[in-house]
Amino acid sequence: MMRIILLALLLATQVALAAEALPRPDHIVIVVEENKSFSQIIGNKQAPYINALARRGALFTNSYGVTHPSQPNYLALFSGTTRGIGSNACPLNLAGDNLAAALIARNLSFVSYSESMPETGYAGCMYGAYMRKHNPAANWKELAAFNQPFSAFPHDYAKLPTVSLVMPDQLNDMHDGSIARGDAWLEKNLEQYAQWAMSHNSLLIVTWDEDDGSEGNRVATMFVGEMIKPGNSMQRINHYSLLRMLAEMYGFPFLGESAGQKSLTGVWLKSGKTH
C-alpha cells in the first residue's frame, strides 16, 4: 500500500513539474524602452501600437525596475547584478558572468543590437543619440563581436541569435523623444518580427528599464509569441526574473540575483517546444 502511495505522489510531482515546464523558444528578442511608468504607457492613446501588442500577448501588471538610474537596470538584466554601480558612469570595464557568455557556453547565441551605434564593437560612450549606458554588453571587452548596431538586425528572422537585446536610441526609446515616437518606432521595426514569432516558436519581450520616479519603479512588460497565453499576469517580476526565465529556458546557471527569483508561471501555452 505504501509503495502505491509513493508511486502516486511521484507521478503527481512529475505531472506538476511538466505542467510548469517553460518553453524553449528558438529566438527571443528583448526590447528595452526608457523611463516610463506602467500608467504612462498602458491605456495611453499616444501608444496605440504598444497597447495593441499588450492585448495580443501577456501583460505583466506587477513588473518593476530594480533601481535608478538607467545603467544598473541594464546590468541587472544582463548579468544578474548591478555590480554595485549606482550611476550612468562611462566607460565601464567589467568582467564576470553575463547572459551572452552563459548562452555561448551552451552552444547558443547572443547579439546586442543598438540603434545609431556606428559600428560593431564600438566602445565610445555616445554617438549621436546612441548611449553606451543603455548597452550593457559594451562593458565586456570580450563581447565586442556580439555588440552590433541595429542596422545589423537581420530581415530573415531565422538568422537571429537565440537571444537578442534591442536598444532603440534616445530619440526612439522614449528617453528624449515622445511616447508616440517610441511607439511608432517599435511598430515599424518589430511588428513584422512579432507576427513571425507567432508561427516560428519565438518570443518578443518589450519592457522598460525604470519608471520616471512616479510609480515606485513599476513598468510595463509584455510577452508576445507562439507559446504565450494572452491576458494579464499579476505575478511580481523584475529584470532578475527575466534573466532567471532565460536560464530556465536554455539550461544555463542562474546568474547573481536571478537565483532568488520565482519562475514565471501562468503565461505559457501547453503546446510548443520545451527544454
Image (cartoon, rainbow, N blue to C red):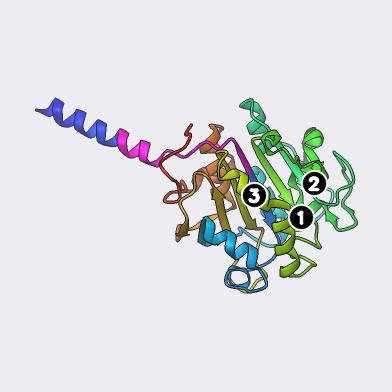
Q: What is the magenta range?
A: 14-28
CA gap, disc 3 and disc 2: 22 Å
Report if the CB atoms under discs 3 and 2 are less than 8 Å apart: no
- Left or right for 268, reference 40: left
The amino acid type found where label 3 is placed reads Ala
In which image quadrant can residue 178 be found? Answer: bottom right
Residue 218 visible, this orientation: no
Residue at image mark 2:
150
Residue identified by numbered label 3: 76
Name the residue that disc number 1 marks.
168
Q: Are marks 1 and 2 in contact (CB under 8 Å)?
A: yes
Residue type, numbered disc 1: Pro
Residue shown at 67%/70% (left/top)? 212
Q: Is residue 49 magenta?
A: no
Dot 1 falls on a residue whose secondary structure is loop
Rendered image quadrant of residue 1 = top left
